Amino acid sequence: MSTVSIYDVAREAGVSYGTVSRALNGRSGVSPHTRRRVVEAVARLGYVPSPIARGLTRRSTIAFGIVVPGMADPFFMPIAQGIEQVARGMGHATMLYDTGRSAAAAVEAAAFLAQFRVAGVVVLGGSNRLDDEMAEKLAGIPTVVALRRSRGGVFPAVFFDHAVGSRLVVEHLRALGRRRIAFVGGDEESVAGVERLRGFREAMRDTGQSADLVLRGAFTLDGGAAATVEMLAQPAGRRPDAIFYASDAMALAGMRRLREAGVRVPDDVAVVGYGDIAFAAIAEPPLTTVRVHQEQIGLLAARLLEQMVGGGPRPADIEVGVELIVRGSSAAS
Amino acid sequence: MSTVSIYDVAREAGVSYGTVSRALNGRSGVSPHTRRRVVEAVARLGYVPSPIARGLTRRSTIAFGIVVPGMADPFFMPIAQGIEQVARGMGHATMLYDTGRSAAAAVEAAAFLAQFRVAGVVVLGGSNRLDDEMAEKLAGIPTVVALRRSRGGVFPAVFFDHAVGSRLVVEHLRALGRRRIAFVGGDEESVAGVERLRGFREAMRDTGQSADLVLRGAFTLDGGAAATVEMLAQPAGRRPDAIFYASDAMALAGMRRLREAGVRVPDDVAVVGYGDIAFAAIAEPPLTTVRVHQEQIGLLAARLLEQMVGGGPRPADIEVGVELIVRGSSAAS
DNA sequence: TCGATTCATGTAAGCGCTTACGGAGGAAGG
DNA sequence: CCTTCCTCCGTAAGCGCTTACATGAATCGA
């Protein structure tokens, strides 16, 4: 166990603890010779600076915080994973805080991570409504949001246009000749929920269709299943010939319900999701969806944070594109 | 921002900082009256003790560490999520360290978390080969492993018998009349990989079958896809009529490949997975698998850790059962 | 009434670092 | 040869807590 402190190193190297600290932190005012002796002593003793003691004086620990709406959600985790990798590359730890998709919890998360004096935080998705409050809690801790922009630009963001994805879907379905397109939205506590719905509505209007088949649920498997059951309860005449789910998880669960009800996908109903999680491609039928490039977003967010932590200026927002991936669940019927 | 320190509280309450500390930590030797004044001052000032300063003196921070083989793996994350919830209930943060399924990385994880002086750590799966080394790095930090036992019982464990699950699968497939059962194993760096294979071999032997169709890969989607492609390359005569994958992810990816090759599931080939991740139930066909009760395991592990952190005696290992969930991918054909 | 306890509280030290400050040499300048 | 200025380094203080110890007041029995 690293019970060896900076004092031990100092003794071993025959210098004072202050010098050790300077040497290790690359401060000036240490002769090359001394520096070398310190480095050697460190190696000999296997000394590792205590992150928490260091955190106390520096008011910042070598840990990043990630605020995530759902720790078990296959959409968010690849992003978090990317961030964790970058963090570890910097020798940083990663703290996860699961908000359970509650906007209020995100503020708590901010406060919590702030008192831990993390070096930086990445907020995944969620709502922008409370960004000011979060910024207040985070008081000066470098923070970036991913998957959305922040309210009033308080935080730099790596984002994409959720509405554009919806538009691509509607146009695709339209081109396929689908006439009655239903939308199953996620919770509107989040930007994703609101914007994907908005995009759907606008695209429907623009293509001269009425967006009257709109349901809401949670972004989860259960949410998708429940909404689909509800949809199936409609009188046959009002049944859609295409369902656009606001997330892949919802779509996948929905397809299962549809099949159980004897509805064929894509013949009777085309199905489209949003997010392109790994399971979308291997579902049966493979799920048409809006690809979001999660890994890229994670890496970009981490990189932005890296810059900010490094003391750089506030970076500009980065927009990434979305892309419609057409698969079997909406193949031409 | 919580820039208010214990000194501020002391001043506000008109007592000394030592008294504030004692009052806040429930130490004896504080009059009820004083205690009340302190509590009031805390509330008035919105004081929150600095976890990191506290960590420095106590040599233990209010954070738990989780060592996880894959942060984006839908099998592990529900467990981690359960732990995170318990942790937060205790006011603790959660640090995740992704080993990428490398046993060596798990030791690094231990060292890393140890220097952060986490209050406790949960190791998910992995190998038990390096448990001694990990214990050494963790020097006294309460630790429990989940999903396997630890070598020589160095850590308390919440485990199940991987081999029993395999046996259930083999017997099930056998009862279905399948004659040529193939096994697609996960990486044998982990206990899960080794034991599931062993269980398969033994069950095959006990039922008088030869276990000659055995492939290995990674536990991931890609691993399952690759192994399946390999399997399909076999001459038709050697083709299995059932494939038992060591994980659900592998099985799901495998089913996709099978379908693409025109192999019908379950008619031509029955497919079974292991783990019962959320997507298993909604796949098409729904996947027969070995249920492992991930949430329960997460909660139990967290609870054990809670006990240990509370200073209790080393808890006994807890074994949880596994259960075969029969679904469409192996329905009687 | 008086020492012996007991209880509540204040103070100092220390956890393992960082960093401002100041002192000791040595090099440069006159 | 003496001042001035660097360079390199040691020391002290402080980050925000906990806790051992010291102090003083209150309580008790005799």
Image (cartoon, coloured by chain):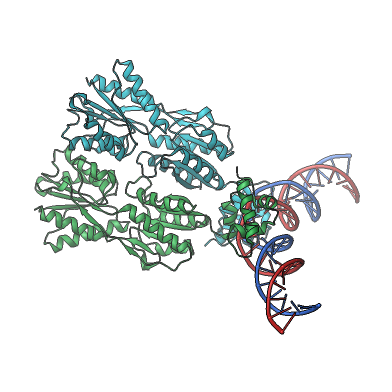
Chain colours: A cyan, B green, C blue, D red
Q: Whole-percent x and y of residue B279?
A: 27, 43
- Can you see residue B294? yes
Could you tell whether B279 is left or right of B301 in the image? left
Q: Whole-percent x and y of residue B193?
A: 28, 56
Question: Relative to residue B158, is residue A176 depicted above or below?
Answer: above
Total marks drawn?
Answer: 0
Could you tell whether B211 is left or right of D29 in the image? left
A107, A299: nearer the viewer: A107
Question: Relative to residue B129, is residue A116 depicted above or below?
Answer: above
Q: Whole-percent x and y of residue B289?
A: 22, 50
* Residue at x-position 59% and y-position 57%: B24
Could you tell whether B76 is left or right of A262 in the image? right
B318, A57: nearer the viewer: B318
A141, B242: nearer the viewer: A141
Using the rendered view, name the quadrant where residue B292 is placed: bottom left
- Can you see residue A316? no
| Placement of the N terminus of chain B among the 4 image quadrants | top right
Q: Whole-percent x and y of residue B183?
A: 20, 53
Question: Relative to residue B181, is residue B256 depicted above or below?
Answer: above
